[in-house]
Image (tube, rainbow, N blue to C red):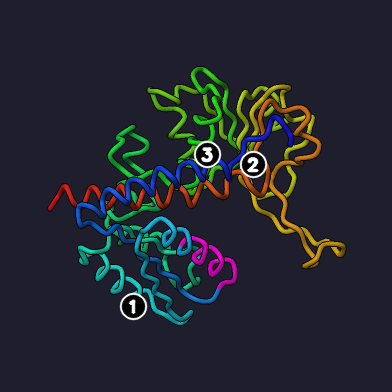
Amino acid sequence: MIDNLIDGKAIAAAIHEETAREVEALLKQGIQPAVAFVRVGEDPASKVYVGMKEKMAAKLGIKSILHILPESTSEAELLTLLNKLNADRSVHGILVQAPLPKHIDQARVFETVLPDKDVDGFHPVNVGKLLLGDTHGFVPCTPGGIHELLIRSGVETNGANVVILGRGNIVGKPMASILMQKGPHANATVTICHSRSRNIGSICRDADILIAALGVAEFVKADMVKPGATVIDVGVNRINDANAPKGYRLVGDVDFNAVQPIAGKITPNPGGVGPMTIAMLMKNTVRAAKMANLKQ
């Protein structure tokens, strides 16, 4: 066992235990937390991801409803389904699995899901609340999971220099919003690097916490990491490898073997950030159920 690993599987398991207890308490009150998964098309990765989410929901006692729509589904048909789910008071959370077919406007789809059922945290209202530091909204699952990894691993963010590689709407931007806030487990000085950034190596070397979410295989090398820094690897990249059982292998955005001896703490990949995303989705679903109950 490598002693500087941040074990995402173990931390996710602890969160699942907490969530299961919350579900049990809700069931005793006659409340069945429920989440609807919507998948359009037969994208192989989407099928796997939705399957994993369904399996975990069942394990925790959360009801899941799966809607599988053909690739040819029109945007109007998808929005009609979402509006039905919005109106269904027995459904507390709605997750539309990305990516969507090219003829469907993904932004419009995310805007259609009610903010109170947006357990993925992608609705503009929830994005705005996150930026404003309003804790009543839903935080996107992957950055929320990374935040929990840092908190539960004892990584100090107060006054820390954080460098985030990637400015995407799913990880980079919300991650920056979380860590720049004034409050516990935040108060960081945040820099975002992207494809147009200059001197990325020198910027990364100044980071106390380095979060890699670029989507470029093994981009972060040993000479880009300050000794003792915490390194969080978000990327999932496929590399062709004739020696691998499937003809390819999955790697992160960090050259793990080179960086691990230098880092103070580091997430493995897989087994780091990935399990946390599902853990936060389940946590958000239970929170949505509680919010809906308070409004009744």
* Residue placed furthest toward the left: 296
Number of the label disc, if any, that sits on residue 146: 3
Q: Residue at x 49, y 35 (%)?
A: 147
Residue 117 position, x and y percent, is: 29, 55
Q: Is residue 44 magenta?
A: yes
Q: Circle 2 is placed at which residue position?
A: 233
Which circle, 1 or 3, is nearer the viewer? Answer: 3
Q: Are marks 2 and 3 in contact (CB under 8 Å)?
A: no
Residue span colored magenta: 43-53
Question: Viewer-proximal residue, 172 or 50?
Answer: 50
Q: Quadrant of residue 92?
A: bottom left
Task: Provide residue 108's location: percent of width, then percent of height.
Answer: 36, 62
Secondary structure at numbered mark 2: strand
Q: Main secondary structure of the magenta part?
A: helix
191 in the magenta segment = no
Between disc 2 and disc 3, whose residue precedes?
3
Task: Return the residue nearer the eye: 179 or 155.
Answer: 155
Is residue 295 shown left or right of residue 247?
A: left
Query: Marks 2 and 1: which is nearer the front?
Result: 2
The quarter in which the N terminus is drawn is top right
Q: Residue at x 58, y 45 (%)?
A: 9
Mark 1 vs mark 3, CA separation in Å: 35 Å
* Residue of label 1: 77
Report the number of numbered marks. 3
Mark 2 and mark 1 lie on one chain; the one further toward the N terminus is 1
Q: Give residue 86's mark.
A: none
Residue found 55% across the figure and 20% down from its top: 160
Query: What kind of residue is marked 3?
Result: Ile
Amino acid carrying mark 2 in the image: Asp
Which residue type does callout 1 highlight? Glu
